């Protein structure tokens, strides 16, 4: 996995095949500032605050809704898998450590 995320003893990752989500946001960077910022720092091993996790959570939901919802199976699979991790970090006030290839 190219982008591993760790918070509160839990692990999640964005795989190479899932990086397409960042291409989807490029056309509307103002609508997705947290996802855009994450992509800008993707290979710099950023640390994400619980507030950033909350922003990512909401932007992922918005991205899915704007891209066909659950009919977009590849996007839906990725978003639905990431949501609980970002929710846990946001609600628990946990910082997310990241590591990228």
Image (cartoon, rainbow, N blue to C red):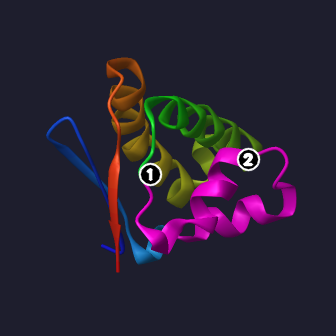
Tell whether position 40 is magenta. Answer: yes
As drawn, is 15 to the left or to the right of 71? left
Q: Of all residues shown, which one is farthest toward the left? A: 9
Q: Is mark 1 on a helix, strand or loop?
A: helix
The span shown in magenta is: 19-46
For the residue pair 51 and 16, the one nearer the viewer reads as 51
Tell me the quarter of the image containing the N terminus: bottom left
Q: Where is residue 58 in the image (x, y as percent from the top left)?
A: 61, 31
Q: In the displayed structure, would residue 81 be above or below residue 19? A: above
Residue farthest along the bottom direction in this orientation: 101
Q: According to the image, label 1 marks what residue?
A: 77
Q: Can residue 68 be seen in this view?
A: no
Name which quarter of the figure residue 89 lies in. Answer: top left
Name the residue located 37 percent from the left edge and 45 percent from the top edge.
81
Residue 9, given in percent of the width and then of the height, sits at 14, 40
The residue to which callout 2 is attached is: 33
Task: Report how many numbered discs are placed on residues in the image.
Answer: 2
Q: How far apart are marks 1 and 2 (CA)?
A: 22 Å
Disc 1 + disc 2, Cβ < 8 Å: no
Label 2 Cα crowd, 10 Å radius (few <14 / some 14-19 / many 20+): some
- Percent x, y for residue 67? 73, 50
Q: Which of 70 and 75 is in front in this view?
A: 75
Q: Is residue 45 left or right of residue 20?
A: left
């Amino acid at each position: 996995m190219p982008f591993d995320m760790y918070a509160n003893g839990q692990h999640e990752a964005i795989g190479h095949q899932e990086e397409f989500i960042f291409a989807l946001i490029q056309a509307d960077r103002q609508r997705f500032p947290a996802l855009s910022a994450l992509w800008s720092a993707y290979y710099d091993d950023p640390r994400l605050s619980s507030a950033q996790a909350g922003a990512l959570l909401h932007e992922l939901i918005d991205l899915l809704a704007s891209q066909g919802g659950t009919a977009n199976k590849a996007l839906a699979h990725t978003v639905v898998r990431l949501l609980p991790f970002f929710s846990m970090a946001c609600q628990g006030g946990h910082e997310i450590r990241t590591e990228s290839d």
